[in-house]
Amino acid sequence: MSNDDIASFFIEDLQVGQSASYERTINDADVREFALMSGDFNPVHLDEAFAQTTRFKGRIVHGMLPVTFISTVLGTRLPGAGAIFMGASFRFKAPVRIGDTVVATCTVKEIGTKGRVTFDCACSVGDTVVVEGDALVKVPSRDVPDKAPSEKA
C-alpha cells in the first residue's frame, strides 16, 4: 500500500454510521512473524502437537493479530491519514485459525468534541464475530491543523 492508497477523512467529513473494512487471509508466515514482533511464542500459536492437546484442538492465531486489522482500517481507510488511536476495548469471542479470512470493520458510532470519534469495531470470519469492541480515535480537522509538538501546551 502506498500513501496514495490511504484515505484521508477530516472530522467534518465523518457521519455516524459510516464504515470501512479491511480483509486479509491469515497464513502461517503471518503467525510466525507476529510471534517474532510481539515476543509471544505461546505454543498454542506455533506448535501443532501442543495445540492439539488444548481445547482448541489445533493452532490458533494470536488474538491481537486480528485487532491489528482494526488499526489498519482506522489508519488507512476510515478516517485514515492523520488519525491517532487513543484507546480501545476489545472482547475475543471465537478463535481464528490459520487459513481464515478475517474482515475487520469499523463504524462511526459517535462524533465527540475535540476531534474525538468513537468507532464500533468487529472482526469476523464468515458469519462469526471473532473480536468486537470499540475504539477512540483523534481525527484531524480541516479547520484546525495540528500544532507542531513544540507548540503544544
Image (cartoon, rainbow, N blue to C red):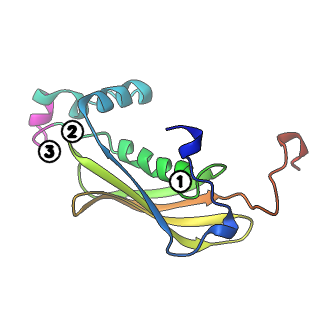
Question: Which residue does the numbered mark 1 point to in the structure image?
Answer: 74
Within 10 Å of disc 2 (Cα), the crowding (few <14, some 14-19, many 20+) is some
Label 2 belongs to which residue? 98
**Residue 55 painted magenta:** yes
Toward the front, the furthest residue is 4
Q: Secondary structure at mark 2?
A: loop
Q: Residue at x 49, y 38 (%)?
A: 1
Task: Please report the bounds of the magenta region as a residue range.
Answer: 50-58
Amino acid at dot 3: Phe
**Residue under circle 3?**
56
State yes or no: residue 63 in magenta: no
Q: Residue at x 72, y 70 (%)?
A: 113
Q: Is residue 58 left or right of residue 113?
A: left
Rate crowding at label 3 as few (under 14), some (14 to 19) or many (20 or more) other CA atoms within 10 Å: few
* Separation (CA) of disc 1 from disc 3: 30 Å
Residue 26 x/y as whole percent = 28, 39
N-terminal-most mark, 1 or 3: 3
Tell me which label, 3 or 2, sits earlier in the chain: 3
